[in-house]
Image: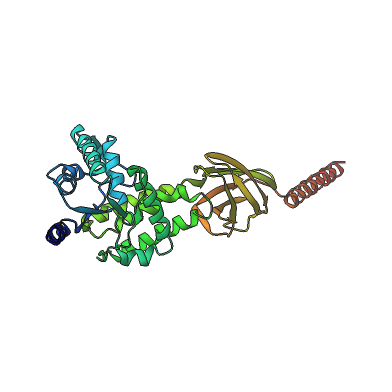
Amino acid sequence: MRKVLTLLTLLLLSNTFLTTPAQAVQEIVITEPTHRLSDGVFFDDELAAKLAPTGELGLLVYSPNRGVRSWLIDPATISEIVAMSNGYVIADGWEIKDAQVSGQDVAKAWLTQFLRVSRFEKISVLTYGNPSRYWVDQLLENEITYINASGKISLEGVLGKATTQSAFQNGEKQGLSKQNINFLKYAQRQIELFSTLVDQKELLSYQLRISQLLNPDIEKNELQDLIEDLDKSITGLRNKLKITKTKFTITSSKEELPITLVNNFESPINLKLSIRAVNSKVVVTPVEQIKIEGNSKQQVLLPIEVLATGQSSLLAQLTNLDNKPVGYPVNINLKLSVISPVATWITSAAAVLLFVAALIQSLRRVRRRK
């Protein structure tokens, strides 16, 4: 009996020693710098090559594995793979060309394989775009919690299961020029301003894009192109809320000018219209709080009083309720063709005097003749 127990003990111990190395957890990281522009169009087809079974990302999911794995996943990379699997085009310079169907098939196959092999394994979520920790602290300190939550929700939507937020942060410092730093600060400031007016979900894509561009693995020359692309995107953001540029000819001393405001956001917006005359020829009455429904235009009547004729203009700027400017300022040109009551009275009096003088002169001539 003792011999049997001893033999069983030895077998259990040997089995433990044999399986422990095989069960050591292998951590697999899936992250890739962006291959898309701000509007979602791919600017190259490198991602498709990396997703192939022999590519960098393909080997991570297609290679046989007998051990225990856990995954560190960048939700931005998965989002781009999903976009590719749904069909995509490639922008060559600014000319959009059709992508090969094979790239779509490769992305579909990779996603299917990834979902299969990771089905019962632990998945942790990296910060969206795997940005440099240094620049996150400098530029996105107040937004990183929201960015992480959004990335986690996005990834779980693809996986169909719960994930955990990874504590990993990219320790490599990305080399940014002073010009790029200033622009990214400007872009973030615009997002923060609009967040005081619209639903934060409408600004999420811009916020995530900044996070993506802070990935240290983006090559320097490529980064500059992506920064310029983001600049155009932020310009589009600012133009979603605007004043229609126009001009007026004023023919009376007091008028109400119809100013058209445009809201291309989904959210209804409460804001103010700040108006300043560039000279003293007109006086403008301030407009109180305005509400514009989502995806709509609204006309606001702006009361003005003309003090003198000539040329003038109004500098119009939309602001939030804290009087911080949003969108772009607009110049409204005015042609003032108004004759004031005083000027009319003086002109009329002068005409009467001339008439009386002419009449007197005529009477004198008649008397002289007699």
Q: Position of residue 340 (x, y in %)?
A: 71, 50
User: Is residue 235 shown above or below 17?
Assistant: above
Residue 332 percent coordinates (x, y): 55, 48
Q: Residue 303 or 171: which is nearer the viewer?
A: 171
Q: Which image quarter is the C terminus in? A: top right
| Residue 118 % position (x, y) | 25, 46
Left or right: 159, with 112 as reference point: right
Q: Is residue 211 left or right of residue 20?
A: right
Name the image quarter holding the N terminus: bottom left
Of the pair 289 and 357, the residue shown nearer to us: 289
Q: Residue at x 60, y 41 (%)?
A: 299
278 with respect to 344 (left or right) = left
Q: Position of residue 262 (x, y in %)?
A: 53, 43
Nearer-the-camera pick, 215 or 270: 215
Extreme-front residue of the structure: 1
Q: Is residue 335 visible?
A: yes
> Viewer-proximal residue, 180 or 355?
180
Query: From this viewpoint, is residue 92 visible?
Result: no
The number of numbered badges drawn on the structure is 0
Q: Is residue 23 left or right of residue 151?
A: left
How is colour applied across the structure in the image? rainbow
